[in-house]
Image (cartoon, rainbow, N blue to C red):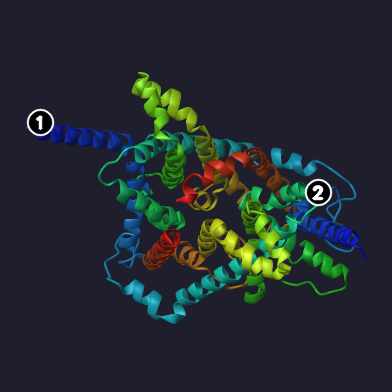
Amino acid sequence: MSKKNKQGVRLVIVNLFFLLLCFGVLIPILYAFSVSLNAENSLLGANFSFLPKKITLQNYKAVFTEKPILLWFKNSVILAVTTLVISLGTGIPAAYAFSRKQFPGRKMILRLLILLYAFPSLLSMMALYKLLSPLGLINTKTGLIIVYTGTMAVFALWNMKGYFDTIPVEIEEAARIDGATQFRLVTRVVLPLARPTIAVTAMMILVYVWNEYIFAINFMTGSDTYTLAAGLYSLQATEMSGSWPVFSAASLVVSLPILIVFFAMQKNMATGLISGGVKG
Amino acid sequence: MKKQQCTIREKKKIRRETISAYGQSLPSILLILLIVIFPIMYTGYISLTNMNVYHWNNYELIGLENYKEALLVFDNGFLTALFVTILWTIVNMVLQLVIAYGIAALLNINGLRLRNLYRTLLIFPWAMPGYVSILLWKTGMYNSQFGLLNQWIIKLGGEPVRWLNSNILAFISCTAVNLWLALPFMITIIDGALQSLDKSFYESAVLDGATWMEQTRYITIPMIKPIIAPSVLITTFTTFKQFDIIYLLTQQVGAKTGADIHTILTYAYEKAFITNNYGYSSAISILIFGMLIAFSLLTGTNNRRRTNE
């Protein structure tokens, strides 16, 4: 066999391998999609098939009409936006100060932040519960916002500080020599330069709140206070229950915004994250 | 005289800068102090008490009793959980690196036209919300009645398997889900590192008659090692801190599957919120935090040494 032929055969095999691999990887999602569209509730028994024989949107309709998913959506949005505003509002000036200014205590605080970043907030959940409950903040949105803001404040400060470090100081100095006031300097020079990291940090905060379920199910009782994540958790099909088609429809509905955000921001993500906190 | 004035002015400048820096970061620092640091310290305090469901308000200090229980009484399960966690981290990291390297290397084969399509499809599990994927795996794949795996087994004439009911099988099932979730990131990192390599190194190696294995061992791996090291380190941390997969697959309240595998995080959670032994659970939390600090200090100094070389 000539060298070219050999290479051709190799390419065919590699392509086949990747097609199989991609299909295999997507099976859990494809199967959920297929189940959510399946008209016959034929999940059991001999007439099982991977592809639905009759297609229906009934399960998606059920998600929106029978379950309080719009209410959960509203709760998630309120929590996510409030957390976002507080963590960015406090995080941006702090990250800027830590990146640009030399002051006593700076190094120590930064070291402490790395350690805090490694601490899973799950471990202090009990203490948080015990602290928030005499204040009457358990089972309130405020309580969850407090928890989320604290967790995200560490991340926001650390991640954005790393990005500010990569912006040359000379740009700001030049603007200052040109007579820009401190306010103009920040609004016209610093913030536009920091836009990528602000966008990525904002996205990470939104995704975190969107996906957080363990605090939400422990701190919230009663399904009308649930977030989307907690609501989905409560909907899940157990070993015996047959609500699996509705659950898979709900899962895909909840995932869709995250999927869109992820693929839209994929390019930004590399720059905003890698030059930010991860490099440490 | 003049010199002194100068230093005074400088001192004033430094003080002004310090004040403005703290002024700017005060809200953020205050948030972190109140919501993150204070609860950790409070956890430390609880760990020294006998707080539990019977002693919710009238608890008392009992010294290091909880730590003794965790570290010296083998039957309490913490040491087993720690062992399982270390095993889990090693198994997952080794599999992840080997598989991700293999796939990334194949993605970079010459003449693979569809590689961008494959990249996008393979990244999908990373883009899905993690807990949703885990729940879909639990029901869609592993459910003993209508899970896909058992449907296929039955079709092929086999006996349905209870994937999550026994320890070893559950460990393997959880590992499969973790690989599914984590490989896209690792493949992306290694793929990026491979693309950044200078091809000319290989040309001379090929001229010298080096085989593919030799090229991999003596050129590729040493070259990508420093590039992927930070990401590997971070993934090791997240694997060690894994909670969602094992909790959601095997130990949800009211839906325990019978498998009894614990990582240290699910163990701490169970002691706090299921068996309500708050003091003991807090001691576990502090021990885990201590380990994470030690681990990050250790790897931090290693990294610095490496960059100094």
Neighbor class of circle 1 (other Cα within 10 Å; few <14, some 14-19, many 20+) is: few
The single residue placed furthest to the right in the displayed view is A1
Residue A238's x, y, as percent?
68, 59
Q: In this picture, is A260 found above or below A116?
A: above
- The chain that hosts pointer 1 is B
Q: Is residue A107 left or right of residue B1?
A: right
Residue annotated with mark 2:
B113
Residue type pointed to by label 1: Lys
* Local secondary structure at mark 1: helix
Q: Is residue A130 left or right of residue A34?
A: left
Please state, as top left, top right, bottom left or bottom right, where the N terminus of chain B lies in the image: top left
Please state, as top left, top right, bottom left or bottom right, where the C terminus of chain B lies in the image: bottom left
Q: Which mark is residue B2?
A: 1
Q: Residue at x 44, y 26 (%)?
A: A189
Q: Can residue B138 be seen here?
A: no
Q: Residue at x 10, y 31 (%)?
A: B2
Residue type pointed to by label 2: Arg
Q: Is residue B52 left or right of residue A163?
A: left
* Local secondary structure at mark 2: loop
Neighbor class of circle 2 (other Cα within 10 Å; few <14, some 14-19, many 20+) is: few
Residue A208's x, y, as percent?
54, 46
Residue B261's x, y, as percent?
57, 72
Q: Check chain identity for marks 1 and 2: say if they share one.
A: yes
Q: In this picture, is B69 found above or below B212?
A: below
Residue B175's x, y, as percent?
64, 67
The single residue placed furthest to the top in the displayed view is A179
The single residue placed furthest to the left in the displayed view is B1
Between the residue at mark 1 and the residue at mark 2, the CA separation in whole angstroms equals 73 Å
Q: Quadrant of residue B246?
A: bottom right
User: Which of the two discs, 1 and 2, sits closer to the camera?
Assistant: 1
Q: In this picture, is B258 found above or below A243?
A: below
Along the polypeptide, which appears first: circle 1 or circle 2?
A: 1
